[in-house]
Amino acid sequence: MAAQKIIIDTDPGQDDAVAILLALASPEDIEVLGITAVAGNVPLELTQKNARIVCELAGRTDIPVFAGCDRPMNRPLVTAEHVHGKTGLDGPTLPDPQMPLQDRHAVDFIIDTLRAEPEGTVTLCPLGPLTNIATALRKAPDIAARIRRIVLMGGAYFEVGNITPAAEFNIYVDPEAADVVFRSGIELVVMPLDVTHRALVTGPRNAAIRAIGTPVAEAVADMTDFFERFDKAKYGSDGAPLHDPCVTAWLIAPDLFTGRHINVEIETTSPLTLGMTVADWWGVTDRPKNATFIGDLDSDRFFALLTERLARL
C-alpha cells in the first residue's frame, strides 16, 4: 500500500513536535508533502520557527515549511505559553533552524497542493487551531472535494475543557474556523481530549524513549519532562498526554483506536461554552453524522509504536 500523502498543519508545541517526528519516521506509511504553521500554542513567529527546528532535528531539511495565519478568523489570538513555555518547545536546548522558511503563504500552499495532486489523495492533519484550513476552504471552495480526509486533534466531550470549563484549546482559539471545517462535508476523524488523555507519557514510557540514546530521543524525553509538569499539577495524572501524536498514530495504525461516527457541532456564540464541541455521542438528535469521534486507544501499543519509530531517527 502506498504511503499516505499528508499536509501537517501545526502550532508546535512539544506534542506537535512528537507528532511531526512520528510522521517523518514512518515513510512507508506517510509522505509529508509539507508543514504549514499557524498561530496557536505560541505566536506564528515561533510556530513556524519551531516547525523548522523539528525538521532539522529529524534530519529532514527537505520538508518545506510555510507560515500561515497569525491570528484567528474573527478573534484575538489566545496562546498557551503557560503549558508549552515561552518558546513553545521549552525543555530541550535546540539550535535555531538554518533551513529556510518558504515564501508562499501556508494557505496558498494547501490550495495549490490539493489542486495539483490527484483528487482524494491528500489528507490534511491539523494539530492546532483550524484557521489555515478554514481560510483555505473559504478562499477555494473547490478544494473540499479534493481532500481525502481531515484527521485533526481538537475538541472534547466526556473530558470537557482544558482552556475553559467547556472547551478544548485548539477549538476555543478559533471556533469559527472549526465551525467551517465541521460543516464542510469532508470526512473528519477527530482526536479529542477523551482519547488523548489516555496517551500518557508515564515515567517508564519516557525512560524507554530516553534509553534510545539518540539526539531525537533525548529531545523528545526532555520535551515531555517539561510538558508533564503542567498536566501533573492540573489533573494529578501520571504524566503528560501526547495529544497530537494520536493523529499520526491513527494514520499508521487506526486499529489502535476506537470511536463512533456521530454529529459534532461547534459552539460559536455562547460566552459560557464558546468553542465547545457538542458531540452527539449517544445519538439523541437527528442531526447528520459528520465526524468519527475517537474515544479510546490501546495506550501500550501506541507507545510501543512511538518508541520503535522514534528509534529510526
Image (tube, rainbow, N blue to C red):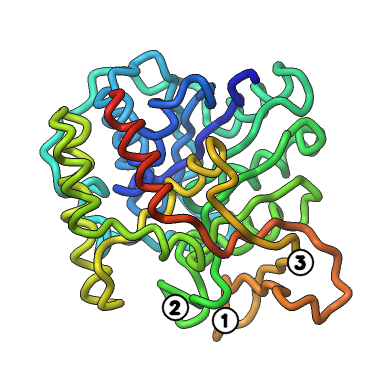
Instruction: Residue 262: give its label.
Output: none
* Camera-nearest residue between 188 and 170: 188
Instruction: Residue 263: give its label.
Output: 3
Give how far apart the Cα atoms at labels 2 and 3 are: 22 Å
Q: Amino acid at mark 2?
A: Thr
Q: Amino acid at mark 3?
A: Asn
Do the residues under discs 2 and 3 have CB atoms within 8 angstroms?
no
The location of residue 44, given as percent across then percent down, is 38, 43
Do the residues under discs 2 and 1 have CB atoms within 8 angstroms?
yes
Q: Earlier in the sequence, mark 3 or mark 1?
A: 3
The location of residue 135, given as percent across then percent down, is 64, 44
Q: Which residue is mark 1?
A: 273
- Above or below residue 252? Residue 171 is below
Residue placed at 53% from the left, 35% from the top? 252
Picture quarter with the C terminus: top left
Q: Nearer the viewer, mark 3 or mark 1?
A: 3
